[in-house]
Amino acid sequence: MTTIAEACAAVLSTADPRAKVRAARRTAREWRAGRLVLDFAAPMPESPARPARPEFLPPARMARRGRAGSEAGRIAMLHAVAHIEFSAIDLAFDVAGRFGGQFPRAFVDDWMRVGADEAMHFALLDRRLRALGSHYGALPAHDGLWQAAGATRHDALARLAVVPMVLEARGLDVTPAMVERFARGGDGTSARILTRILNDEIRHVGTGVRWFGFVCAAQRFEPAVTWHKMVREHFGGSLKPPFNDSARASAGLTKEYYAALAAGEQA
């Protein structure tokens, strides 16, 4: 039988977007059915396979996305979110396959659900881009999410602190305004897709918060203080308001985590 680590590595090693979605869904389904062995001997790739497009550019060279009221602006925004969701597929399966052996089985259960969600999100966005006459890969993207994953590949606590609790939490802050802009521009279909993603991402951030807290409890660390330390050591950017405090609170990411760092204080 295939192991869970081998199956996760196979998702990461799949470059074609549609094939990656299929591999992600298949792996989550096989895990739920009990057809994957709980074994983590297989290593995760140092970086995931990528299609020939999109072209990767540094964040500073990325063009402004424009306004959601124009078709070009809508496409640019949706493409940016699609790339985030595409990267999030790899992030979910990497965290499960790379760190699952350090946690109870429920850790893998949770990240398989997250990975299946991310695959569904990407598929919805790619379908929407095609309906608008575009597709994933038509515009450049940047690889900041995976760079953060690479920087935390040797430390489960750092990975949980940075990827779900900083980078994915940022999506909770910015998505409501995107939904409003799409709705105001008359694109209710895209607004509904983004609303669905936002609701799922609250749960995904909550998954990161919960397992971060699990490690802190096991090590007798104070969670907020430990998170501050992890963010200062492993995250190169800054925490920028405004914050969606209610969505963050729903995910368990309360103000004691991020308020001090956002204010530039030493925690």
Image (cartoon, rainbow, N blue to C red):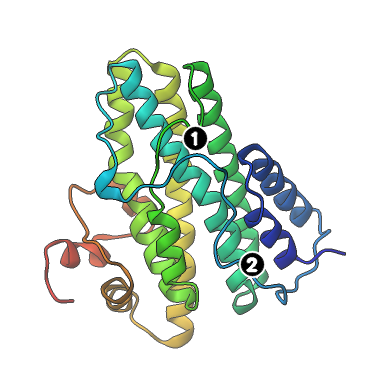
- Closer to the N terminus: mark 1 or mark 2? 2
Sort mark 2 into few (<14), some (14-19) or many (20+) by Cα contacts within 10 Å. Answer: many
Residue plotted at (78% across, 53% down): 30
Q: Up-down: is 156 above or below 59?
A: below
Q: Residue furthest bottom?
A: 220
Percent of width and height locating residue 133: 49, 17
Tell us which disc is closer to us: 1 or 2: 1
Give the SS element for disc 2: helix
Q: Quadrant of the N terminus?
A: bottom right
Residue annotated with mark 1: 137
Q: Quarter of the image holding residue 103?
A: bottom right
For the residues marked 1 and 2, what is the alpha-carbon distance in whole angstroms?
27 Å
Does any portion of residue 244 appear in the rendered image?
no
Q: Which image quarter holds the C terminus?
A: bottom left
For the point 66% across and 50% down, the residue is 14
Left/right placement of residue 91 relative to residue 142 reads right
Identify the residue position indicated by label 2 in the image: 97
State the image coordinates of residue 19 (x, y, percent, origin top left). Answer: 69, 41
The quadrant holding residue 171 is: top left
Q: Of the residues shown, which amino acid type is indicated by label 1?
A: Gly
Residue 229 in view of the camera: yes
- Kindly indicate whether the residue at mark 2 contacts the one at mark 1 (C-beta within 8 angstroms): no
Rendered position, 181 above or below 88:
above
Taking the image as shown, residue 210 lies to the left or right of residue 68, namely right
Rendered location of residue 61, percent (x, y): 27, 45
Secondary structure beneath label 1: loop
- Residue placed furthest toward the top: 186
On the rendered structure, is 66 left or right of 157? left
Q: Residue 165: horizontal and vertical position, in percent?
A: 37, 61
